[in-house]
Structure formats: C-alpha cells, structure tokens
Image (cartoon, rainbow, N blue to C red):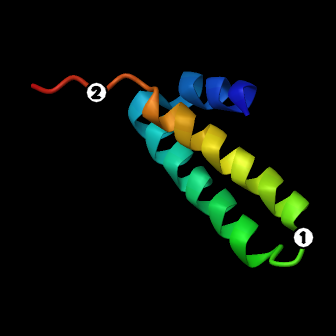
C-alpha cells in the first residue's frame, strides 16, 4: 500500500492523495464488514488495509492556507 500511495502522491499531489486514501479506507472497511461476516480472519485483513490507508491519509501534510 505504501508503494501505491507513493506512486499516487507523485502523480496527483497531497490533496488528492488524502481524498483517495480516505476513500480507499472507507471502501476497505465496508468490504470487511459486508463481504466477510462469517470469516473473521479475512475480514480482519480488510480492516488492516483500511487502517493503513487511513494512516496514510492522516499523515499527509496539510495544504497551505492562503
């Protein structure tokens, strides 16, 4: 995920990467709760992905305000 985030950052910048990271975190969390209600181990993997994308989004520098 970090390699993917680095590639996206280079292509679109921090503001768009933050938006992408939060979107991906939301989608991974949604997948973990809906698609694997009876498979806790596999669902937990999806939560790890969601948390990692959320961490990436939160750790980006804030955009400069005018």
The residue positioned 57% from the left and 59% from the top of the image is: 26
The residue positioned 89% from the left and 59% from the top of the image is: 41
Q: CA distance from mark 2 to mark 1?
A: 40 Å
Residue 56, quarter of picture: top right
Circle 1: element type: loop
Q: Residues within 10 Å of mark 1 (few under 14, many from 20)?
A: few
Label 2 or label 1, whichever comes before in sequence order? 1
Above or below, comparing residue 64 to residue 39 in the picture: above
Which dot, 2 or 1, sits closer to the camera? 1
Image coordinates for residue 20, horizontal then vertical, percent: 53, 46
User: Count of labels shown?
Assistant: 2
Residue where numbered disc 1 is placed: 39
Residue 31, quarter of picture: bottom right
Q: Nearer the viewer, residue 43 or 31?
A: 43
Image quadrant where one finds the C terminus: top left
* Disc 2 and disc 1 in contact, CB within 8 angstroms: no
- From the viewer's perspective, tell me whether residue 34 is left or right of residue 59: right
In the rendered structure, find residue 63 and report the number of the disc placed on it.
2
- From the viewer's perspective, tell me whether residue 64 is left or right of residue 27: left
Above or below, comparing residue 51 to residue 33 in the picture: above
Above or below, comparing residue 46 to residue 53 in the picture: below
Q: Nearer the viewer, residue 50 or 17?
A: 50
Above or below, comparing residue 49 to residue 44 in the picture: above
Q: Residues within 10 Å of mark 2 (few under 14, many from 20)?
A: few
Image coordinates for residue 44, horizontal then vertical, percent: 79, 56
Image coordinates for residue 7, horizontal then vertical, percent: 66, 26
Circle 2: element type: loop
The residue positioned 70% from the left and 27% from the top of the image is: 2
Image coordinates for residue 65, horizontal then vertical, percent: 15, 27
Image quadrant where one finds the N terminus: top right
């Amino acid at each position: 995920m970090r390699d993917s985030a680095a590639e996206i950052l280079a292509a679109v910048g921090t503001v768009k990467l933050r938006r992408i990271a939060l979107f991906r975190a939301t989608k991974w969390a949604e997948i973990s709760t809906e698609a694997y209600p009876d498979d806790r181990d596999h669902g937990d993997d999806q939560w790890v992905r969601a948390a990692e994308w959320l961490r990436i989004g939160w750790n980006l520098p804030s955009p400069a305000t005018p």
